Image (cartoon, rainbow, N blue to C red):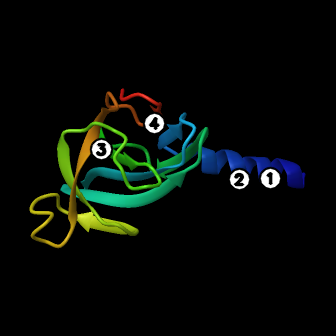
Amino acid sequence: MAGAALLAVLLSSEARAEFTVCNQTLDVVNLAVGQKVDNADQTDGWWTIGANQCVNVIREELTNRYIYIYATDVFGHAILTGSTEMCIERRRFSIRGIDDCWQRGHIAAQFLEVDTLEQVRWTFFLTGSSP
């Protein structure tokens, strides 16, 4: 009985993971995510993802078609090629707005746009080569 209850809890927590990033490289990566929140652009970071591991970065059903991701290696070097400029920080952050990053004391970074095709769940696979 307790095993069934535990299984139900595990399954329900799994169901909330709506945007997952899987690191299929041999290196640890740090990930930042950008999306629209309450009609404003917002970036959040960092998630550390071990080699051959997955992390749930957005736990609600997706309401945005486009999610933006930025990933670095352990030395802070970008490992994705993106073209959408958004703001990040060196340490954990949540930043509203993507304009004038430097003027507002943030770091500008080039995020990769991920088209989720308007699905409510999406998994992005980070591989050794750019998608």
Q: For residue 9, which numbered disc appears in the image?
A: 2
Mark positioned earlier in the residue sequence (4 or 2): 2
**Cβ–Cβ below 8 Å for labels 1 and 3?**
no
Mark 1 sits on what residue?
5
- Taking 126 as reference, is 54 left or right? right
- Taking 121 as reference, is 7 left or right? right
Mark 4 and mark 3: span between their CA atoms?
15 Å
Mark 4 sits on what residue?
121
Image x and y of residue 50, in percent: 59, 48
Question: Of 74 and 131, which appears nearest the observer?
Answer: 74
Mark 3 sits on what residue?
68
Residue 59 seen in the current view = no
**Cβ–Cβ below 8 Å for labels 4 and 3?**
no
Which residue is found at the position 35% from the left and 66% from the top?
90
Judging from the image, what secondary structure is the residue with disc 3 in? Answer: strand
Image x and y of residue 87, in percent: 22, 59
Report the amino acid beneath label 2: Val
Can you tell which of label 4 and label 2 is closer to the viewer?
Answer: 4
Mark 1 and mark 3: span between their CA atoms?
36 Å
Mark positioned earlier in the residue sequence (2 or 3): 2
Judging from the image, what secondary structure is the residue with disc 1 in? Answer: helix
Mark 1 and mark 2: span between their CA atoms?
6 Å
Can you tell which of label 1 and label 3 is closer to the viewer?
Answer: 3
User: Would you call the spot at circle 3 few (<14 residues within 10 Å), some (14-19), or many (20 or more)?
Assistant: many
Can you tell which of label 2 and label 3 is closer to the viewer?
Answer: 3
**Cβ–Cβ below 8 Å for labels 1 and 2?**
yes
Mark 4 and mark 1: span between their CA atoms?
25 Å
Image x and y of residue 113, in percent: 27, 37
